[in-house]
Every structure is written in C-alpha cells, then in structure tokens.
Image (cartoon, rainbow, N blue to C red):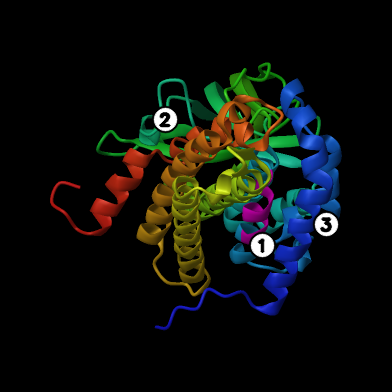
C-alpha cells in the first residue's frame, strides 16, 4: 500500500477554513476565557454553525457527511491556537456523539444526534471513576433493572462537557450484572441532564484546559427508562474500548496541533526578539531547537493520519492509534517545554500562547489512555508474551 497523506481538495479547504477561524475568532478571545476559567459559549456556538460538531456524521442525522480525517484536521488546526476549544470539540464528537452514532438505536439517533451535530447540545462520556481510571474494568457504578427503569448509583470523575449550560446528557458505564466467572458485566446507559439524583459538581480547578468544562458526577438512585440502554446489555466494556480506539486518533491530532502551534509561536518570537544585536533565531542553538520541534510535529501528523486512513479503510487500526497517541502526546510536552525555553521569561507569562500550551500539554499523556496504557496496547498487538 502506498501511503500518501497529502490532503484531498475538500479536506484542504476544511483545513484552511478552520485555520482562519482559529486565528481570527479563537485567538483574540480565548486568553481572557482561559484566565477566567470560563467556558467559551460564543466560540462553541460559532463552531456549531460551521458544522464542526457534525463533521464525521451522516447528513440524515444532521451531520456533515464527512469522516474521521476531517475531524482530525479540524482538531489539529484549533489546537495550534488553543487546546480548551479543541478538546471541547473532540470530546463533544468522539465521546459525546460517537457512542450514539455507533451503538444507538434509530430512535436514540433521531432524538440526540441532530442537536449534537449542530453544537446546540453537548454530551459527556462517564467512564472514569475516583478509584478506577486505567483499570476501566474495575467500574463500581451500578445500574439495577427495576421494571421499566434502570436505577443508577455511583460516581464519575474528570468528565468533559458534563456540566455546561448546553449539556444534554452523560453516557454512563455501569455494572449491570455478573458473568459466570464472576467478572462484572458492564453496560452503557444514557442519563439526561437534570434527572433527579444526578448531581453535577462544580468545575475542577485545573492546571490547564481552563476554558473547557470538566466535572465530577454523582448518581444517587437515578432512575432512567430501560430504553436509555445504549447498545447491547453487557457490551458496554467492548463499546467504550472501540470509542477510545477512535478517540486516540482524535487526541493525537489535537496533540499534533499543539506541537505545531509551539513551532508557529517559536518561529514568530525568534524572528521578532533581538538579543546582542540580532534576532535570536539567527543563533544556531535556537534554529536547531525549532528544527527538531518541526520534525516532531510532522512525524506526529503522519502517524495520526495513517491511523485515520486505516480506520476509514475498515482495516485494523488499534496499534497505529495507540502509537500515534503515545508519540504525539509525548512530543507535544517536549515541544511545549522547548517553546517556553525559547521565549525565556516571556514564556512564563500567561499573555503568551506558549504558556497555555505548556500548561495544556501534560494532560495529553494522561487523558483517553495514559502513555503506559498505550505501550501496553502496542506490546499486546505485537503478540509479546504476558502483554
């Protein structure tokens, strides 16, 4: 197979459109939102009008009829400017709407997808728990069938887009029974916002992603209709593994965007900043740093686009997605550190974008599967003993 990751005309047009939006609309505003730890509703509404939340979904359900490559392109361009906006889109699509699209009934798709695709509504994905992160099989939240209802009890943490004014529901993984070998049977259930007993905590005080919404959720005898089961009962674990495999491609695209944004800002600063009578970019030490940063960003881009192309072709992509997520997240941290160093004292000031990038980069090695988990997945796909 010949690999060619140059963009087709429609994807290049999308890239240019989102690039312009990121620089003209997001960049001038997002710093203030970030400092106030405030969700940027006006930016999100504009993204909805552009169709970004509907990119990979079919037109019959309100989507744009695009694909996962289109989503990755949009995420990369947004993250070159700001990651809070990018993660709002990523989580809204990959974790909020995609489970409905992949596993929902036709009635569930008709009910939720049009508003999700338009950006009128956001959905959350309630997976992580206080005592259960990488070990998702250790889920303690329970859902017990009582007639025509599910009764849910438990707690979820670090859930993106779960408490905004436009959040419509959270999809929750819960133990619904036990298998013959004693292993938990995990199912996925849609819990609409405002359901009695469903409590959304105040936003976390975070190191980064300060203009995105992240909350802890609690469920105390929460009752929802039995029809809110998403997919097959007992298949929730397998379903979210599929969602996370795809989501790693999206996170990789986002991380690549952050890494490329560090290059953009460093080139700009190294050209404008003078020391000892000349631009600091004339110094070979700075040139080599930026050259290495560009090399990393380019390689990460090839990796996530390769994984996306395999997904679109219906080929196995789990290993490629894990490699892309692992590499891009780690080089994003490296590029952010180097960009901060190039900026010197100004890199420590929040008025400069690289300060946000530095604060935003670390979570990329943790969210949607830690670097350690990605290495486990890669080793397992290679067939190594005990993996």
Q: Find numbered disc 1 in the image and state the secondary structure of the residue it sits on.
A: loop
Precedes in sequence: disc 1 or disc 3: 3
Q: Residue 387 at what x, y percent from top left?
A: 20, 47
- Reply above or below: 324 against 353: below
Q: Where residue 103 sits: x, y (%)? A: 57, 54
Numbered tag placed on residue 353 in the rendering: none
Residue closer to the observer: 215 or 10 = 10
Q: Residue furthest bottom?
A: 2
Spatial CA span between label 1 and label 3:
13 Å
In which quarter of the view is residue 45 placed? Answer: top right
> How far apart are the two marked residues, 2 and 3, measured between alpha carbons?
34 Å
294 left or right of 238 in image:
right
Secondary structure at badge 3 equals: helix
Q: Are marks 2 and 1 in contact (CB under 8 Å)?
A: no
Disc 2 to disc 1, C-alpha distance: 28 Å
Point out the tag, 2 or 1, that comes first from the N-terminus: 1
**Badge 3: how crowded within 10 Å, few (<14), some, or many (20+)?**
some
Please indicate whether residue 133 sits to the left or right of residue 50 in the image. left
The mark lying in front, picked from 1 and 3, is 3
Could you say which disc has been placed on residue 50 in the image?
3
Q: Magenta stretch: give its range.
A: 73-81
Location of mark 2 (residue): 133
Name the residue that disc number 1 marks: 56
């Amino acid at each position: 197979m010949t690999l060619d990751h140059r963009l087709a005309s429609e994807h290049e047009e999308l890239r240019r459109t989102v690039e312009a939006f990121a620089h003209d609309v997001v960049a001038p505003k997002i710093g203030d939102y970030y400092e106030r730890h405030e969700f940027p509703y006006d930016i999100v509404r504009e993204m909805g009008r552009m169709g970004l939340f509907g990119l990979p979904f079919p037109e019959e359900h309100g989507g744009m009829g695009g694909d996962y490559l289109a989503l990755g392109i949009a995420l990369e361009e947004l993250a070159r400017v700001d990651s809070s906006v990018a993660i709002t889109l990523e989580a809204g699509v990959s974790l909020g709407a995609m489970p409905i699209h992949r596993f929902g009934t036709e009635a569930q798709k008709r009910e939720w997808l049009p508003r999700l695709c338009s950006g009128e509504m956001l959905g959350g994905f309630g997976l992580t728990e206080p005592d259960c992160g990488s070990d998702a099989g250790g889920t303690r939240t329970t859902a017990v069938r009582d007639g025509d209802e599910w009764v849910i009890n438990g707690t979820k943490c670090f859930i993106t887009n779960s408490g905004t004014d436009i959040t419509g529901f959270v999809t929750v993984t819960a133990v619904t029974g036990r298998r013959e070998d004693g292993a938990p049977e995990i199912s996925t259930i849609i819990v609409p916002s405002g359901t009695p007993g469903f409590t959304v905590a105040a936003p976390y005080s975070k190191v980064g992603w300060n203009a995105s919404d992240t909350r802890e959720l609690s469920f105390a005898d929460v009752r929802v209709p039995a029809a809110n089961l998403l997919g097959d009962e007992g298949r929730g674990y397998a379903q979210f593994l599929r969602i996370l495999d795809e989501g790693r491609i999206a996170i990789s695209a986002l991380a690549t965007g952050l890494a490329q944004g560090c290059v953009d800002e460093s080139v700009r600063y190294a050209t404008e900043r003078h020391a000892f009578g000349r631009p600091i970019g004339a110094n070979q030490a700075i040139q080599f740093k930026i050259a290495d940063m560009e090399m990393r960003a380019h390689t990460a881009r090839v990796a996530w686009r390769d994984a996306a192309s395999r997904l679109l072709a219906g080929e196995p992509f789990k290993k490629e997605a894990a490699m892309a997520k692992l590499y891009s997240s780690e080089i994003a941290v490296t590029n952010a550190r180097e960009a901060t160093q190039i900026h010197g004292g100004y890199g420590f000031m929040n008025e400069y974008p690289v300060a946000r990038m530095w604060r935003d980069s670390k979570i990329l090695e943790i969210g949607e599967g830690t670097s350690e988990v990605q290495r486990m997945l890669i080793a397992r796909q290679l067939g190594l003993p005990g993996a």
